[in-house]
Amino acid sequence: MPPTGIPRPVSIYVIIPTYNEGPVLAATVTDLLKYGYSVVVVDDGSRVPATQYLKGFRAYYLRHLTNLGQGAALQTGTDFALQQNADVIVHFDADGQHSPELIPSLIEPIHQGECDIVMGSRFLKASDRKQVPLEKRILLKAGVFVTWLFSGVWLSDTHNGFRALSADAAKQIRMTENGFAHATEILELIKRAGLRYKEIPATIRYTEYSRAKGQSILNSINIVFDLVLRKVMR
């Protein structure tokens, strides 16, 4: 029986947005299920439904009929987790970059009442920084500045998809930015709601698959365009 105030693993819901990830997704889900977490896979309109790779898995499966974007998939999964009375919600990439072993340290500040939201950072430890390819490091640091301009929040790593939210915090954050720009929108919503946040070191596992998938400069330009358009449309 866990100590009072510390949720059981089953009440920790791990949301995995996925789009055409294929067999890599199965390995990611397998690793998470070993720890007893409630895993929610949100298939964002993959050409081959992700169920093809998850047969026999004890995970929740939700599917968008069309590709709406990572932000939309995360919101769908978060809404579902809240309906299931989740205590803590964790956002987790499908491609194997994040390590389940880091989840306890990610959610510990929430358990201790230090903050409402915890975000993983690749830039708080020298050993983690070295794992990030140089071109990606430059792109991410530019993203920190752009995100600060739009959200008013300065972090060391603003586009790391590894984060944890208390249930109360998740109820106060509703993403409307469907694409990758949701990472900036989240920070804007955090600031507006007055939620407490912190970063913790997070080692990213860069596999050949994740390196090949990457995030292109064109995609980064699209994120900035989405942010500008969102500001103008307000």
Image (tube, grey):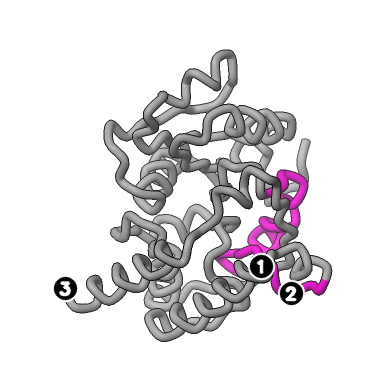
Residue occupying the point 40% across, 79% down: 151
List x then y, in percent, for residue 130: 78, 68
Whole-angstrom CA distance, mark 3 to mark 2, is 35 Å
Q: Which residue is mark 2?
A: 124
Tell me which numbered mark, 1 or 3, is placed earlier along the sequence.
1
| Neighbourhood count class around disc 3 (C-alpha, 10 Å): few under 14, some 14–19, many 20 upward | few
The amino acid at mark 3 is Met
Q: Is residue 102 in the magenta section?
A: yes
Name the spot of residue 150 as percent of width and height, x first.
37, 81
Question: Disc 3 marks which residue?
Answer: 233
Residue occupying image coordinates x 37% and y 67%: 223
Quadrant housing residue 129? bottom right
Task: Name the amino acid type tagged 1.
Answer: Ser
Q: Is residue 24 magenta?
A: no
Relative to 37, say whether 57 is above or below: above
Front-lying residue, 182 or 116: 182
Figure quadrant of the C terminus: bottom left
**Residue assigned mark 1:** 121
Q: Which mark is residue 14?
A: none
124 versus 26 height, above or below? below
Inspect the image, locate mark 2, and give the three-letter code of the amino acid beneath it.
Leu
Q: Are marks 1 and 2 in contact (CB under 8 Å)?
A: yes
Marks 1/2: CA–CA distance: 6 Å
